[in-house]
Image (cartoon, rainbow, N blue to C red):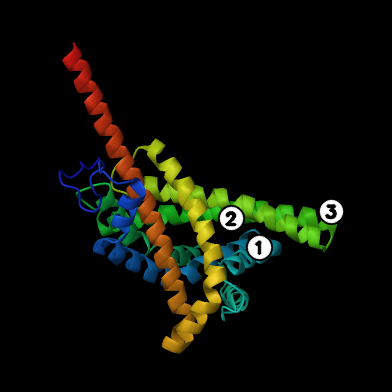
Amino acid sequence: MVAPAEKPTLCEPARKPHSAIWQTLGFLFQTEVHVYSFAVAVNVLLTFFPFLACMVILCQYVLHWRPAVQVIIHAVNDYFPTGFGVDFKGYLIQSANSRKFSWISVFLLLFTANGIFVPLEVALNRIWHVKQNRSLLRNQAVSLGLIFACGMLVLTSVCITTLNVQFLTQRFGVSHLGAVTQMVIFKLTALPISMLMIFLVYWLLPNARIPVKRLIPASVAVGALLEVSKYVNILTWPWLQAKLRNEVPPFVQSTSIVLWAFIATLIILAGAEASARASVSVAEDSLEESSRKLSAA
């Protein structure tokens, strides 16, 4: 395990007179946090489609499960508002049909999808006061493992949702009640999976052993906040679309993906910072309690 640095870099000291919310806001306005978040957001733009294409290829050629492909496309449409301007369904189907399945192709697609973990590991190491980052090769190995783990979790969520959709379609047919029930099941399945993926990133990506108990509340809170931010994205999309069409007409979709990935990364880093600050507070409380017991003895 890599020893913590003596001087914290990104995290503020755990004990402050103001509230934890103000400490988190102060953290989010640090320059380095924005640098890391933009680095992750750009990599999301580059790796988002290869990861989706890989999932579609696995469902289509390995599982031979067409409804699962439709569930993946439905999940993508759920994250991007109507009128986004990109035919994700057409591009994903075209990408899947234009590739002959091979495990080498899947491996390469997953390898290209792990770029977000390089800046994210550096940011989490700084938050947890870890002095040394992994080497690039070790980071790629850990990142690839996380990609496979997250990919399996996504496939599990897709399979559960697909089975429920098929059952509900047979039970209720194509109706408003059936559509609403399918949407509720999709949300109930996807949200815990998202929280579990966030927990794995918090736990495995830093180059140190992180207390698991401190990561669980942060993973749940961050997963819920990301779900809320998705609806904020949908509500504000008309305004953002009009603004981007005036400012950067050729890059409306790519700019919006980078902006929302940037915001999502800020939320993820804020959750990690809150966990690190809480862990330091607990450690200080334990030291004070030990000192009091020694003094009393």
**Which of marks 2 and 1 precedes in the sequence?**
1
Q: Position of residue 190 (x, y in %)?
A: 59, 53
Question: Which of 285/41 is in front?
Answer: 285
Q: Is residue 211 visible?
A: yes
Helix or strand or loop: what does disc 2 sit on?
Answer: helix
Q: Residues within 10 Å of mark 3 (few under 14, many from 20)?
A: few
Q: Quadrant of the C terminus?
A: top left
Against 205, residue 47 (above or below) is: below
Picture residue at 63% right of the left edge, 54% below the top: 187
Picture residue at 58% right of the left edge, 62% below the top: 58
| Disc number for residue 155 | 2
User: Which residue type does callout 3 highlight?
Assistant: Arg
User: Which residue type does callout 1 highlight?
Assistant: Val
Q: Position of residue 265 (x, y in %)?
A: 39, 61
The residue beneath circle 3 is 171
Picture residue at 32% right of the left edge, 59% below the top: 28
3 or 2: mark nearer the eye: 3
Distance, label 3 to label 2, CA atoms, is 24 Å
Left-right relation of 68 to 37: right
Residue occupying the far top of the picture: 297
Q: Is residue 112 visible?
A: no
**Which of marks 3 and 1 precedes in the sequence?**
1
Q: Position of residue 108 (x, y in %)?
A: 44, 66
| Disc number for residue 107 | none
